[in-house]
Amino acid sequence: MALKKEITAKIRDLLRQNPQGLNITAIVHNININRNTAGRYLENLMVSGQVEMRQFGMAKIYRLAQRVPLSAMLSISSELIMLLDRSMRVIYANDPLLQFCGTARKDLYGKNIEYTPFVTVFDDAFDSLKKQIRAGISGKEWYGELSLQRKGVVFACRITPVVFEEGQRGVSVLLENITERKQAERTIQESERQFRLLAENSLDMIHRHTPDDVCIYISPASKTILGYDPDELIGRPVSEVLHPDDAHIVPEYKSRLNRKNHTAKISCRARHRDGHYVWLESVLQAIFDDKTGEFVEIYGVTRDITEQKKADIALHESEDRYRSLVEISPDPVILHRNGKIVYMNPVAFRLIGASPSDAVIGKNILDFIHPDFRNVVKKNINKDLQGDRTPPTELTMVRIDGTPVVVEGRGVRTIIDGKPAVQVAIRDITGRKKAEQALRQSEARFRSYFDMPLHGIAITSPEKGWLQVNDRICSILGYTRDEIVRLTWEEMTHPDDLAADSEQFNRLLCGEIEQYTLDKRFIRKDGRVIWTSIAVGCVRKPDGTVDYIVGLMEDITGRKRAEQAMRESEATARALINAPTDSILLLDAQGVILDLNETAALRFGKRRGELIGVLADSVIPTDIARARRSMISQVYDTRSPVRFEDERNGVWYDTVAYPVIDEAGEVKKVAVIARDITNRMRTEEALRQSEGKLHAMLQSITDPMTMMDENLTIIWANDTAKRYFGADIVGRKCYEAFHQRQNPCEPSPCLTLKAFGDGKMHRHETTVIDREGTTRFFDCTANVALRDEHGRPTAVLEISRDCTDLKRAKEALHKGTGDVRHTDAPGIRTKKAPSLN
């Protein structure tokens, strides 16, 4: 039997006139319908929530439900809510939805959704929304995400079948704006990506340890430095690889840790995987919990300083030998500063016919130069002080007794007591020896780099074909040298990558480009396909034709697989993300639950019917109940909404309590809306921790680090860079901040521009003048640190390793004379170069 609206209205009016309630007999008597008919109408009204029934003994009393209309509750929700009937006509839309669509109720209500502004507002997502609404009308609930590309907004959408007061079917559509959460997730991913980029590409070993010194992370550089794969060290105590004599260093360091003094630099020996020991220098930083102050973790950046240690030892030995050599040298050696003699070896004293007691030290060097040669000597001294290389000069010196003596002399710049001076060797052939040694050193460096296991290197000639390949390229491709030289580059290239490689190679030969980099696949001898990153450049003859071609190859198969696995993992994570809906409760002045939605009941772990009429304080922890009672009281006192956040059983809620005011202006009830913000809180915490990790790790690195935008403006610099180049380095152009000295015949390469151009990592050595005017040598690496949403580089991170001391120590060692700044010869006071720390 169809229910008539007129009879339903009469029953509601009758119960409204009798708020204490009526039994079915009284209702039948006043409406003039039979009991069965009245029962069906009352049952429909109870199902729709308009009428409630209470039983007193055998009697059933019906009265109008004491509740807030659905529209009143929906209107205060922060979600975008809409109700549609079975014909897809809009019958309700709350204020947030109207504001988002920029329309009025009169333009929506009663219209089919396909003829409303929804079509243009939701654009490409509208067809999907319409499809799910039709499914909801047929009884199928749906929850998912809708992305509005043009507006840059992402919604979590829930479509639920509903039954209206007259028994008609329809759907409710709830839209929650989750754009900020998505952006926060992307920010975390980018922060983690930067950390991984720096850790995975750093030449130094980056590691993390528990307070008990158990390793929980170590970067791939452990393979290069210690010979261990990261998996072999994770989970093991640090003490297992330390030299027994150095095991005390870590406990001593930890005993001094506190929140004010949480960093230290230590040097110790560690056992390499093959059994020998290497010297390591580590910058360690203790991490304390922001809330509890508890010591929770240790971050470290470690580098191999074995060569530096060897060089220092060799340099000291060389200095000792040099001091002995100067004293017993058959050739005269003279040191002068500001034109005054500060040291002469015994042979020099004999050369000018003087003795140490003749007070020669302190006299002007020109006093012992024949007047005809003083101008030449002055010019040579100026060149020597500027660092220019002067040739051996034949000149006449004057002895103490006035006797002339013809000598061949040559001067070099040095440092004595921190001031520039000139060391003069008379009748010296050191120049030829230095040239021979420099040649051997250059050849040794080339051989060392060519045989370096990190990269495959091949040298070819357009006319002669293969000239040379190293062991690493044979290892990557699986061929022997003899097998490779019998093949062509094209025969080993994967067919799908041949066209791209050939195009770049032809451009190189034609002179359009000087070098190129490319990720491409090769087919190994065993038939397996591998991914490589190749860099190809050429050396040209004077006529511009290509003399020979150099190719560098790196096996990146593992990285490619890791990138693919990461993309699949991220896609899976996005598919599983779901956002909770809000809990809605209606409370009276005593805190009794008058009504609530299914989400709230689910969070309390009970059915909705079990919670209506129950004191809200009885279903939540006492401390939370006390705080919420205070907030509810504030709503009654101020007649204004109150918003607060709290945590219950590990779940965080953003709660808003709204007053429900009657016609007299009094607060009769309070509507409480609680949103689960646990994911947001965890996201914010994860972001803080991730940024803390990155900041701690960046500041613990002892190398100067700068980040530059595409205009070569420095947008960030770590403390080490500021100590080297000045505290005002940020905001300046790199070429203003760094005074580079280059060979005038070779233009200075800009690593940052290269990294912006091809998105790859670049490395080279350069000479830079720091803020104190000291010339320093750096080993620089540049790589993309930030990209925009289209993958284009927006910032490049440049890491510069100061190798000045090592370079100068090796040069002094190879020269066989050392640096006078370190000498302890009689009459000379030593002083090291000023420190930047």
Image (spheres, rainbow, N blue to C red):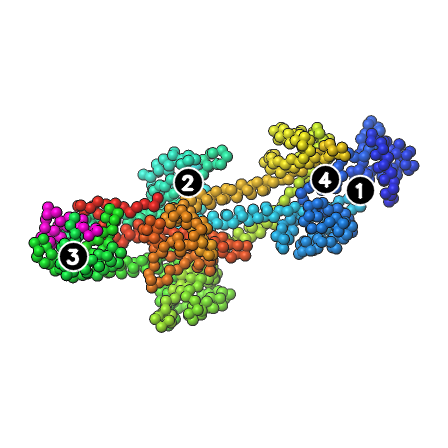
Which tag is nearer the camera, tag 3 or tag 1?
A: 3
- The residue stretch that appears in magenta: 337-361
Regarding residue 605, the answer to whether it shows in the image is no
Residue 558 pos. (x, y %): 47, 54
Q: Which residue, given by chain and number where applicable, does mark 3 sit on?
A: 426
Rounded to the nearest angstrom, the CA distance separating label 1 from label 2 is 66 Å
In the picture, the disc for residue 165 is 1
Mark 4 = which residue?
Answer: 73
CA distance separating discs 3 and 2: 53 Å
Dot 2 and dot 4 residues touching (CB under 8 Å): no
Drawn side of residue 5 relative to residue 766, left or right:
right
- Tag 3 near tag 1, CB within 8 Å: no
Residue 606 place in picture, x, y as percent? 69, 35
Does dot 1 land on a helix, a strand or a loop? loop
Label 4 SS: helix
- Left or right: 176 as drawn, with respect to 824: right
Residue 37 colored magenta?
A: no
642 displayed left or right of 52: left
Q: Quadrant of residue 387?
A: bottom left
Secondary structure state at the residue bearing disc 3: strand
Locate residue 21, reporting x and y percent.
Answer: 83, 31
Q: What amino acid does circle 4 point to?
A: Met
> Which residue corresponds to mark 2?
285
